[in-house]
């Protein structure tokens, strides 16, 4: 008996759903619509007046259609309304493709051996100093990029913070999706328009100079500068060999290059938000930051015009 009752309940539910036309409208609207359809076919025996008058039926139909239209407008998917920036998307595809190719063609365990050396001693892992410098700088790059992107992040489709924090470990592999889906925002901003962290930390000149010094010291503490001074040819040749033989060195180097160029490309937009009216062209300022990767964009953040308070 219990099984029959369950089957009858399922059948009744299926009937109500089919009467509602498998609509995505709210349940109350679907039931009202279904009851009106049933009332048209089976008038109430105890009343001379039908359950639903033509006026009521028209009103119900209007509400039903209105709900459908409203849900179509408000139920935006994860990718709805996303605009794609082709240069950043192309860089992302190239980076992932290159990294995958190198990982498939390197000698088994080559990258893992280097990674284990870094885990044992991040500053002196015992491999090429130029690569050590690049690898360590990658972990810092998310900070000046945050200084560039966060003032224009308020009205973006996706929140910037998860992508920026992820890029500390994954570089452009994790900041890339945000870069190629964000909409440029060059409108003039004040600190009052920003969140607390952006206005009080990322816009703070003491913090900006601290990051610039950290980038400069990384070139020294990682041994890159000393190696180039003492044996430039041997250091560059060793780096080239490591780039050729291991995926971690080649992918990290391409990642570092893409982050450097991307950061430079966001500088004219950042200057526009600050209502920059200087004599030096924004494009020239942006290009100059790429001359000393990492340090250049960090210095820009320390030297750029401050936003007005309000």
Image: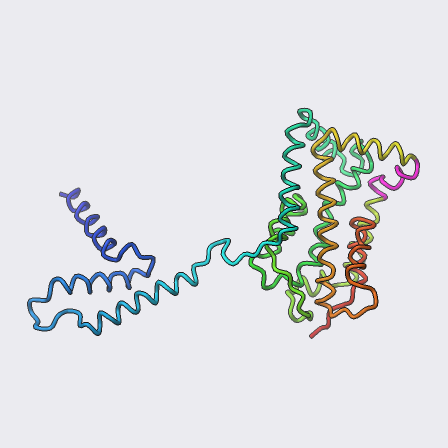
* Rendering coords of residue 146 (x, y %): 69, 56
In the picture shown, does residue 279 fall above or below 112? below
Quadrant location, the C terminus? bottom right
Residue beneath the point at 24% across and 53% down: 18
Q: Magenta segment, principal secondary structure?
A: helix
- For the magenta stretch, what is the residue range? 220-230
Q: Closest to the observer: 191 or 197?
A: 191
Q: Quadrant of residue 188?
A: bottom right
In the picture shown, does residue 47 fall above or below 1? below
Residue beneath the point at 71% across and 54% down: 145
In the visual, does 187 lie left or right of 224?
left
Q: Closest to the observer: 143 or 54?
A: 54
Q: Quadrant of residue 49?
A: bottom left
Q: How many numbered badges does the structure rendering display?
A: 0
Taking the magenta stretch, the answer to whether it contains residue 282 is no
Extreme top residue here? 108
In the picture shown, does residue 83 fall above or below 252? below
Residue beneath the point at 46% across and 55% down: 77
* Rendering coords of residue 284 (x, y %): 81, 59
In the visual, does 263 lie left or right of 296?
left
Residue beneath the point at 17% across and 42% down: 3
Taking the magenta stretch, the answer to whether it contains residue 225 is yes
In the visual, does 287 lie left or right of 229?
left
Quadrant location, the N terminus? top left
Q: Quadrant of residue 111?
A: top right
* Rendering coords of residue 165 (x, y %): 64, 50
In the visual, does 243 lie left or right of 94?
right
């Amino acid at each position: 008996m219990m099984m029959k009752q369950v089957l009858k309940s399922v059948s009744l539910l299926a009937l109500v759903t089919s009467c509602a036309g498998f609509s995505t409208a709210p349940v109350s609207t679907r039931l009202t619509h279904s009851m009106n359809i049933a009332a048209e076919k089976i008038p109430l025996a105890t009343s001379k007046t039908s359950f639903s008058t033509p006026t009521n039926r028209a009103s119900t139909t209007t509400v039903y259609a209105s709900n459908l239209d409203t849900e179509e407008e408000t139920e935006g998917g994860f990718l709805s309304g996303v605009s794609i920036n082709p240069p950043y998307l192309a860089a992302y595809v190239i980076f992932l493709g290159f990294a995958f190719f190198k990982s498939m063609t390197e000698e088994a365990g080559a990258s893992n051996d280097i990674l284990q050396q870094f885990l044992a001693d991040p500053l002196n892992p015992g491999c090429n100093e130029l690569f050590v410098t690049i690898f360590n700088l990658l972990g810092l790059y998310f900070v000046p990029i945050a200084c560039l992107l966060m003032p224009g992040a308020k009205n973006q489709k996706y929140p910037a913070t998860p992508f920026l924090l992820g890029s500390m470990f994954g570089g452009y592999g994790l900041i890339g999706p945000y870069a190629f889906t964000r909409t440029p925002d060059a409108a003039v901003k004040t600190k009052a328009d920003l969140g607390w962290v952006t206005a009080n930390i990322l816009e703070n000149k003491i913090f900006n100079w601290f990051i610039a010094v950290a980038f400069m010291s990384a070139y020294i503490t990682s041994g890159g500068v000393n190696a180039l001074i003492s044996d430039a040819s041997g250091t560059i040749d060793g780096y080239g060999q490591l780039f050729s033989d291991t995926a971690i060195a080649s992918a990290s180097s391409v990642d570092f290059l893409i982050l450097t160029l991307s950061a430079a490309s966001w500088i004219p937009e950042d200057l526009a938000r600050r209502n920059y009216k200087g004599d030096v062209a924004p494009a020239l300022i942006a290009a100059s930051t790429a001359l000393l990767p990492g340090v250049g964009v960090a210095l820009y953040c320390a030297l750029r015009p401050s936003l007005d308070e309000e």
